[in-house]
Amino acid sequence: MKHIIFDCDGVLIDTEIVAAEVTVDWLNSEKVNISVEEFILEHTGKTFTNIINQLKAEGYLNASLKTEAIVPLLDDQIKARVRPILGISDLLDRISSSKSVVSNSAAGYVVEALEKIGVSHHFGNRVFSAEMVALAKPSPLVYRLAMDTIQVPKEEIIVVEDSYTGVQAALAAGLTTIGFLGGSHIQPGHGEKLKQLGVYDVAHSHKELARKLKLIIKQ
């Protein structure tokens, strides 16, 4: 392996729990009865647009709600609370292989978040967002875009994903994937679910992830 692709939310930045809290607060205000735990289990890894449109289609949200107006408001609240996942800076410094980010979040949001936590120099312009393709994860399209752009064979790429949705996308693109379980949103049993999907391995922290990457990548 020569190149590492990281998901963003839940792998580099610890926003999945923040995103869940912010979105659940808004959904509850719209009379949707859902808890943070339920939201994490059902929607982690999906785009806000897809979540809102799904709930509108299922009748939980008013069909007249303007999704395109709601999403930026949720994004702004989450961006204000961005924080790195413990150990990510040390991991990125220790692993010299080239790196990319593939995310369901908007490209501008990802770039801003990486700059805020001080790790953007590790990725350069290799930031790929679902808004760049026709379908978000679990579709593999954004991973295929990344592979086409970086021109690295899939056999030489390792992916780090935390969500069921993200792992599905990476595996569908034919990429070896490690499930990351170090985010504060991870629920008991999540690692087993990712193993059942077919991940190569799981890591419970960035310290553990660094050890495992050192064994399988070519520096």
Image (cartoon, helix red, strand yellow):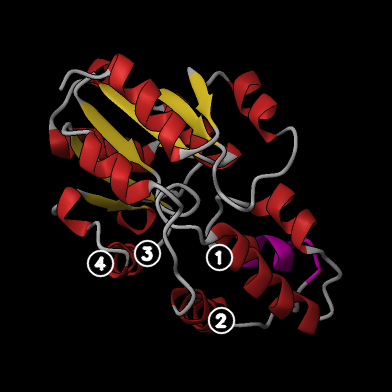
Q: Nearer the viewer, residue 106 or 116?
A: 116
Q: Mark 1 and mark 3: span between their CA atoms?
A: 10 Å
Is there any visible trace of residue 53 in the rendered image? yes
Asked whether, in this view, residue 33 is left or right of residue 156, the answer is right
Q: Sequence order check: which comes first, mark 1 or mark 3?
A: 1
* Residue of label 4: 115
- Please report the bounds of the magenta region as a residue range: 52-60
Q: Amino acid at mark 4?
A: Glu
Q: Sequence order check: which comes first, mark 4 or mark 2?
A: 2
Q: Mark 4 and mark 2: span between their CA atoms?
A: 24 Å
* Residue of label 1: 48
Q: Nearer the viewer, residue 116 or 134?
A: 116
Label 3 crowd (10 A; few <14 / some 14-19 / many >=20): some
Q: Name the residue rendered at 81%, 69% in the picture.
A: 60
Q: Name the residue rendered at 26%, 43% in the picture.
A: 92
Asked whether, in this view, residue 200 is left or right of residue 19, the answer is left
Classify residue 63 by image quadrant: bottom right
Which secondary structure, mark 1?
A: helix
Note whether 64 is above or below 86 in the view shown.
Answer: below
Q: Sequence order check: which comes first, mark 1 or mark 4?
A: 1
Q: Label for residue 117?
A: none
* Residue of label 2: 70
Q: Label for residue 106?
A: 3
